[in-house]
Image (cartoon, grey):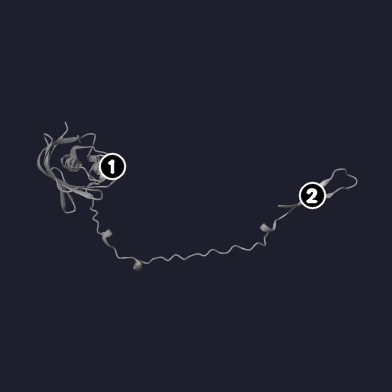
Amino acid sequence: MISAISSTAPSSAPIRRQTVTHVRSNAFSSRTSPLRPRHVVPFAKASDADLPPPGIETQGQNFPALKDIQQIMDILPHRYPFLLVDRVLEWEYGKYAVGYKCVTVNDNFFPGHFPQRAIMPGVLQVEAMAQLAGIVMLDPEAGSESEQNNNFFFGGVDGCKWRKPVVPGDVLMMRVDVTKFNPRFGICKVKARAFVGEDLVCEADLTLVLAK
């Protein structure tokens, strides 16, 4: 900033007054050259004709839920991280059920089973089938959750076989068929099978006992 100072001293006044005049620098004068307009690249919007036709992304099967996760949680007492049924597709009380679990790397057991090769523990595959069987044996007409006993335990596991590893990204599709059911004593026996695609990955005969 440049300043010019002028002084006046009238003979009748002993006080000297100073007047300061501010002069704008040439760097900020209005005569500076205007900014150049920015070059804008037009956005080319792709039309549907330019996109590839739908492929495998449209072939995934999203089965409608007979019982969704909220309804499952109304029936089963299990909660995170041990609720292993995501959706029930078919169900008949005391007869059978079909449901599945989506296996994801975010499941809490994968960091330790195993760090170098993630495999769903076989015992948890059996647990998932047992939970589906529990949905079959619990009476939906028994009343609200506070009025019915929805706790059940393993009574036995027979003929259990694992045939193929289950890994993150798989959908564990399960079916349980009741072979013997005594509601009076709270004992239910089922034939349980689990599939990934068309491959049978686990099967077992399960005995469940309703808690007293």
- Would residue 1 be found to the left or right of residue 42 on screen? right
Mark 1 surroundings: few (<14), some (14-19) or many (≥20) residues within 10 A: some
Furthest residue in direction front, as rendered: 116
Q: Tell me the residue at 27%/62% (across/down).
A: 55
Furthest residue in direction left, as rendered: 180
Q: Secondary structure at mark 1?
A: helix
Residue 121: x and y in percent read: 21, 42
Q: Which residue is mark 2?
A: 19
Of callouts 2 and 1, the N-terminal one: 2
Residue type pointed to by label 1:
Pro
Disc 2 and disc 1: Cα gap in Å? 80 Å
- Would residue 49 be found to the left or right of residue 134 on screen? right
Q: Tell me the residue at 83%/49% (across/down).
A: 7
* Rendered image: mark on residue 185: none
Mark 2 surroundings: few (<14), some (14-19) or many (≥20) residues within 10 A: few
Furthest residue in direction right, as rendered: 11
Quadrant containing the C terminus in the rendered view:
top left
Q: Tell me the residue at 18%/35% (across/down).
A: 152
Q: Is residue 134 above or below residue 47?
A: above
